[in-house]
Image (cartoon, rainbow, N blue to C red):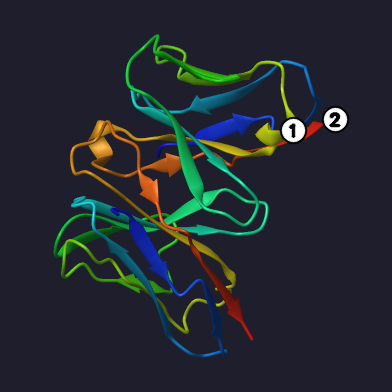
Amino acid sequence: ELKVEQNPLFLSMQEGKNYTIYCNYSTTSDRLYWYRQDPGKSLESLFVLLSNGAVKQEGRLMASLDTKARLSTLHITAAVHDLSATYFCAVDIKTSGSRLTFGEGTQLTVNP
Amino acid sequence: DGGITQSPKYLFRKEGQNVTLSCEQNLNHDAMYWYRQDPGQGLRLIYYSQIVNDFQKGDIAEGYSVSREKKESFPLTVTSAQKNPTAFYLCASRPGTANTEAFFGQGTRLTVV
């Protein structure tokens, strides 16, 4: 059974600081996705990582994938209040068809 | 505009009542999913379907049922057997070939009264 674990689950940081969210998964996969969820809202796709060593960047967010370590990171640079949200990683594996498994989410609060 | 539409946005259910949540997509996606989200929690997979007339149980299928009679539609029925149905329900879809992200509807908030 595929397990996806994120840490930290809660993150409070000051504006202007850097931090990294980690996503570990238990079974070999080369397909990992990051999403953002604002309170009471649906999920918005941020990044799609499809190979070992993949790196994607959008604004102050950068995601990477290390399939050998079964680890993805979401790095936040110079955080701003607008980045406050919950961030989810999700993984699927070829042997499970289209099944998509999510981590527990990291609730990020950026304080002025 | 292409997208995924969930309805209703808010739904109230009496104890012992079955209710059906609608999910429709016009993206021509093969795969569709239902997730449940409890306050402060992650997403748990209820059911998913990769093609019409076929679907698989997820991690928490007990007390739920689905159908996939049309490619565009994947309704979820919350039955009276689901003892704690109050939650936020999210429907998603993606193309049949993997390596693409799933796209989500706006969600249905179900409350038992």
Q: Is residue A95 left or right of residue A37?
A: left
Query: Which label sits on residue A112?
Result: 2
Proximity of marks 1 and 2: CB atoms separated by less than 8 Å: yes
Disc 2 residue type (three-letter): Pro
Task: Identify residue type, mark 1.
Answer: His
Task: Decide if residue B52 is in sight here.
Answer: yes
Coordinates of residue B14 in the picture (x, y in percent)? 56, 90
Q: Residue at x 27, y 31 (%)?
A: B99
Circle 1 chain: A
Task: Where is residue B72? Give x, y as percent.
Answer: 21, 63
- Judged from this view, the residue extending furthest toward the front is B1
Residue A103 picture location, percent across and down: 53, 38
User: Chain ID for label 2?
Assistant: A
**Crowd class of label 1 (few under 14; some 14 to 19; many from 20; radius 10 Å):** some
Which residue appears at 27% of the width and 40% of the height?
A96
Mark 2 crowd level (few <14, some 14–19, many ≥20, 10 Å Cα): few
Task: Name the residue tied to disc 1.
Answer: A81
Q: Quadrant of the C terminus of chain B?
A: bottom right
* Observer-nearest of B42 and A110: A110
